[in-house]
């Protein structure tokens, strides 16, 4: 059974930092692209950052470039999102996603989300 579990959210002041963690089990982690998404109230879920399998490439949303860093530890089956210079508009539920194309199918797994609130 695949499990994807996020942690590390919380309340932080503007300009502060947080590190989110996402631990995945029940899958061959290194073969999956790992992504962070976020969803703010009354807004659609948006892609924040992606680390492709085998560390092939990393991509960021324009809104977080230069402030957020995604990294993965394949030995620990964990992906991280380091968030610096946080802004109130970064407030959202952050979700971790594991995705991989297998033949004609696309396997995707989601975590339950972790709340990040940026407020003074």
Image: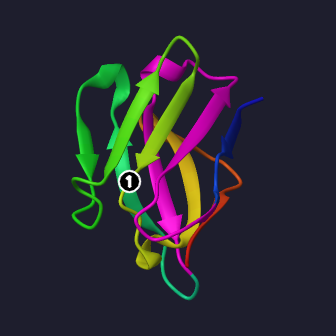
Residue 7, compared with residue 10, is above or below; it is above
Provide residue 59's location: percent of width, then percent of height: 25, 46
Position of the C terminus by quadrant:
bottom right
Q: Is residue 15 magenta?
A: yes
Rendering colour mode = rainbow
As drawn, the residue found furthest toward the top would be 75
Q: Total of numbered circles in the picture?
A: 1
Residue 106, compared with residue 32, is above or below; it is below
| Lateral position of residue 13 relative to residue 111, left or right | left
| Lateral position of residue 32 relative to residue 42, left or right | left
Residue at point 40%, 65% (across, down): 15
Q: Is residue 34 magenta?
A: yes
Provide residue 20's location: percent of width, then percent of height: 56, 45
Q: Nearer the viewer, residue 71 or 34?
A: 71
As drawn, the residue found furthest toward the right would be 1
Provide residue 79's location: percent of width, then percent of height: 50, 33
Residue at point 58%, 38% (across, down): 21
Image: magenta residue range: 11-40
Q: Which residue is mark 1?
A: 84
Q: Nearer the viewer, residue 14 or 45?
A: 14
Position of the N terminus by quadrant:
top right
Characterize the local packing of mark 1: few (<14), some (14-19) or many (20 or more) Cα atoms within 10 angstroms: some
**Quarter of the rendering containing residue 32:** top left
As drawn, the residue found furthest toward the bottom would be 42
**Quarter of the rendering containing residue 103:** top left
Q: Nearer the viewer, residue 108 or 60?
A: 60
Provide residue 96's location: percent of width, then percent of height: 56, 47
SS at circle 1? loop
Residue 38, compared with residue 119, is above or below; it is above
Residue at point 46%, 59% (across, down): 16
Q: Can residue 6 be spotted in the picture? A: yes
């Amino acid at each position: 059974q695949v499990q994807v579990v996020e942690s590390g959210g919380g309340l932080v002041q503007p300009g502060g930092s947080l590190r989110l963690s996402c631990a995945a089990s029940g899958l061959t982690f290194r073969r999956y692209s790992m992504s962070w998404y976020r969803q703010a109230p009354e807004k659609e879920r948006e892609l924040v950052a992606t680390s492709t399998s085998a560390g092939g490439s990393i991509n960021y949303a324009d809104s977080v470039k230069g402030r957020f860093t995604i990294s993965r530890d394949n030995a620990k089956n964990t992906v991280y999102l380091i968030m610096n210079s946080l802004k109130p508009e970064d407030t959202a539920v952050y979700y971790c996603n594991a995705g991989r194309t297998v033949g004609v199918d696309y396997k995707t797994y989601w975590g339950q989300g972790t709340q990040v609130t940026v407020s003074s």
